[in-house]
Amino acid sequence: MNNPDPRVLNGAQIILKMLELHGVKHVFGLPGETTIGWYKEWQEHSDIEYVLTRDERTASYAAESYAKITGRPCVLEAPSPGVTHCTPGITEAYLSSVPIIYFSSDIPINQDKKHGLTGIDQTALYASISKESFVLTNAMEIPFLLRRAFRVATSGRPAPVHIRVPINVFHEEAEISDLYAESEYSFYPAHRPVADHSKIRAAIDVLLKAKKPVIVCGQGGLISKASEILLELAELLQIPVGTTTPGKGTIPENHPLALRVIGGRGGMEYSNSYVHDADTVFFVGTNTDSAATDHWKLYGDPTSKTFMHLDIAEAHIGNNFPVQVGMVGDARASLEYMVDILKSNYPDLKRDKLDLNPVKKSALDRVFNANIPMPEGTISPVKLTQALDKILPANAIVTSEPGVSAIYPSALLTIKEAGRRYITNYSMGALGYSVPAGLGASFASDGPVISFTGDGSFGFVMGDMETIKRSKKNVTIILTRNDTFGWIRGEAILLDDVDEPWSTDFGAVDYIKLAEAFGFQTARIISEDDIEAVLSAAINHEGASFIEMMVPTQDKIVPFVPSWVRAAKAKNLPYFE
């Protein structure tokens, strides 16, 4: 595989060649003094598209979203002055098992000891939120270390790899004879280890004997691209499948066996009750975190049922619930083996058909037809999601983030085709995610992108509206506005019995004027009757669109958060469940 004709190249050229060999098409980032040497070579010698953002945080979230949708590790870069700004996106990627190859340029090695401007220990900074964090100390080692970076990022549990590049390495020349890539690491998961065969057989025995089993799938099912085989297993055994919010879309949500979202961030009463009452719970590709389990209360007494767990990350298995069968392996490969065994050993297997669609339709209809009076001047987020669900194109991607902007689509939007069509950041849950994620999604897919955001989050990312406009992509930002950090307000009032939360409300902004200043097509929804027409016009517009809609705060109309709903019932407040 070695290059038979050694070439003298500088560090910048070697990096670009290695990225091209790994099939990289886009890089997200922002320039700085420490990257000028790289950019000079880039402009002259490479066709990799550079997506210039206005904030390194935006670039990091865009890269995370892009990697989720493409199934390829995404490349992110930032200069030394902005190196700390990428931590939100890298943290989300690390917790979400998303591979990012993150280059941070730097002043020369040890110049930070002289207090050189922008000098910090970048490697130590990113070591805790990356799978590996290392330094390029000379041009000769670049091919080896980039092959390692892609290999580490895409194998096992995928995650970011951080690469620190001192400015002088871009200019240093070396004779390179190993300029090649290992192509299998240009995608993830790069390898698909099958779980222990005896444990897979034990899991089959448990599922066959269970009276009311359920499969709960996290985003590991999407990472593994296990949708087709998961659905085949569910149909063979007639087992309902619920997903966590980040796992939404692992199977089509209109399928008879789809429970849709479960848990504390968008799980409805019917789906949460079903998994609570199950006698056997089979976790697939989920870390059983607090959000997905209603702070680990969702399944009731853990000794009252049987748990099984399949995950590529051994640390997740049995971490929060006692498992009878724990399986370490790739979800798709392991489920394929499970299905093969079932078909071979149980050719006459017959199971009573289940159809959850009537239950789901009834639950959704109750919400859609609830007609709870909204506070004056606000529109129901339920009606917004209902209208979007009706007109959403099959090739669209929806991004959302914590808060009222995410809870309603998480619960009510129906993903009709399996795959990463709904992108959230419920691993870390920081604000300011959805708009950058929409930017990344727009470069990863040809369809329209709809980004739900709240005004608390939107304040983090307004500058990159210019990036979206400049990109000429079909991105629609939907701002559900209530002039407050509504999640914190709701938590304080509903759970902590605070009469008036301190430091949650902020001043009103004319967001329509702001969007117009950036060149967006704009609209304000002021009536339920306007919603569908406004959404259709935005989605069909080949460019940047912005929609504003006033919504109630979470303490006024309580959304699909089980702990809040329990409080709302006790306080006699209106709620959806």
Image: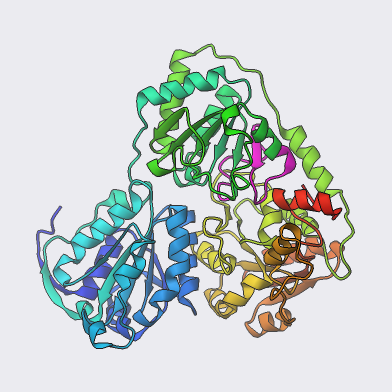
Which x, y percent locates residue 84? 41, 75
Quarter occupied by residue 8: bottom left
Q: Nearer the viewer, residue 499 or 251?
A: 499
Total numbered circles: 0
Q: Is residue 34 visible?
A: yes
Which x, y percent locates residue 248? 59, 47
255 drawn magenta: yes
Left or right of residue 128: residue 229: right
Quarter occupied by residue 87: bottom left
Q: Is the residue 7 above or below the residue 265 in the image?
A: below
303 drawn magenta: no
Left or right of residue 14: residue 451: right
Which x, y percent locates residue 287? 49, 45
Name the outermost residue toward the top: 348
Q: Which residues are magenta?
A: 246-271
Q: Is the residue 77 above or below the residue 569 in the image?
A: below
Q: Residue at x 20, y 63 (%)?
A: 143
Q: Residue at x 59, y 14 (%)?
A: 350
Q: Residue at x 18, y 72 (%)?
A: 137
Q: Nearer the viewer, residue 148 or 202?
A: 202
Which x, y percent locates residue 266? 67, 50
Quarter occupied by residue 514: bottom right
Q: Is the residue 555 above or below the residue 33 in the image?
A: above
Main secondary-structure element of the magenta-colored stretch = loop
Q: Is residue 413 visible?
A: no
Left or right of residue 353: residue 231: left
Q: Residue at x 66, y 77 (%)?
A: 520
Colour scheme in use: rainbow
